[in-house]
Amino acid sequence: MSFILASGSASRRAILENARVAFEVDPADIDEGAVKDSFAGDPAALALELAERKALEVSNRRPGALVLGSDQVLEFDGVAYDKARSVAEAEERLRQLRGQTHHLQGGIALARDGEVVWRHQATSTLVMRNFSDAFLADYLDKAGDILTKAVGCYAFEGLGAQLFERTEGDYYAILGLSLIPVLGALRAHGVLEA
């Protein structure tokens, strides 16, 4: 059975590759902005809704395949945030989160033949340290293309870890894909050996 990742995320690909999971990449083509604009639920439910829509969109055009959709929403003070659109917006986001607690809401769904067959939601709590303006400027200079990184404008698996004082939750969920539950679901659906 073919297993497909419905995402172009380099982080999600790396997580699956490092776990030696065989998969194809076929990014979903959904209008995330429209989903977010019309969604009335909380950020955790929004992440799961986006994941399900991604899995279903690819599943509908790839019959018989097991398709993994995943999404992550940054929640700060009850508000859901999108990825920054500019370095200036990323800098402002990091200033806003500095010294504060925020949550990453992760949603994951598996679909086959146009039907969701498994879903998972994970919440990670992250506390940014009260870093200096000089550190922030150096981080923005050295971090590379932070606009393609997580919605929080940090690559937690690298230099971005230095932004934090404390985290609670699944390390892989912070990176964008809760690996251990996904591996269990893949075993249950015959993609991996039990």
Image (spheres, rainbow, N blue to C red):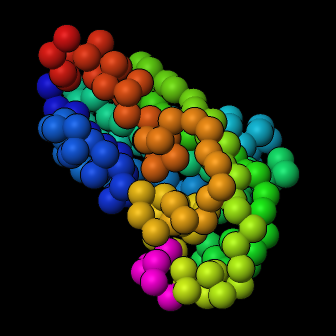
On screen, residue 90 above or below 58: below
Q: Quadrant of the C terminus?
A: top left
Q: Quadrant of the N terminus?
A: top left
Q: Residue at x 36, y 55 (%)?
A: 11
When asked about the image quadrant of residue 93, the answer is bottom right
Q: Residue at x 21, y 46 (%)?
A: 17
When asked about the image quadrant of residue 109, the answer is top left
On screen, residue 3 above or below 18: above
**Residue 149 at what x, y percent from top left?**
47, 66
145 in the magenta segment: yes
**Residue 106 at what x, y percent from top left?**
56, 40
Query: Can residue 11 be seen here?
Result: yes
Report how many numbered discs are placed on residues in the image: 0
Is residue 132 found left or right of 72 in the rendered image?
right
Q: Relative to the observer, which residue lies in front, 19 or 64?
A: 19
Is residue 124 found left or right of 120 in the rendered image?
right
Query: Can residue 48 be seen here?
Result: no
**Residue 42 at what x, y percent from top left?**
77, 39
Q: Give the residues drawn in magenta, as a range.
A: 141-146
46 in the magenta segment: no
**Residue 23 at what x, y percent from top left?**
19, 40
Q: Residue at x 42, y 19 (%)?
A: 117
On screen, residue 112 above or below 147: above
Q: Residue at x 45, y 84 (%)?
A: 142
Q: Relative to the observer, which residue lies in front, 108 or 143?
A: 143
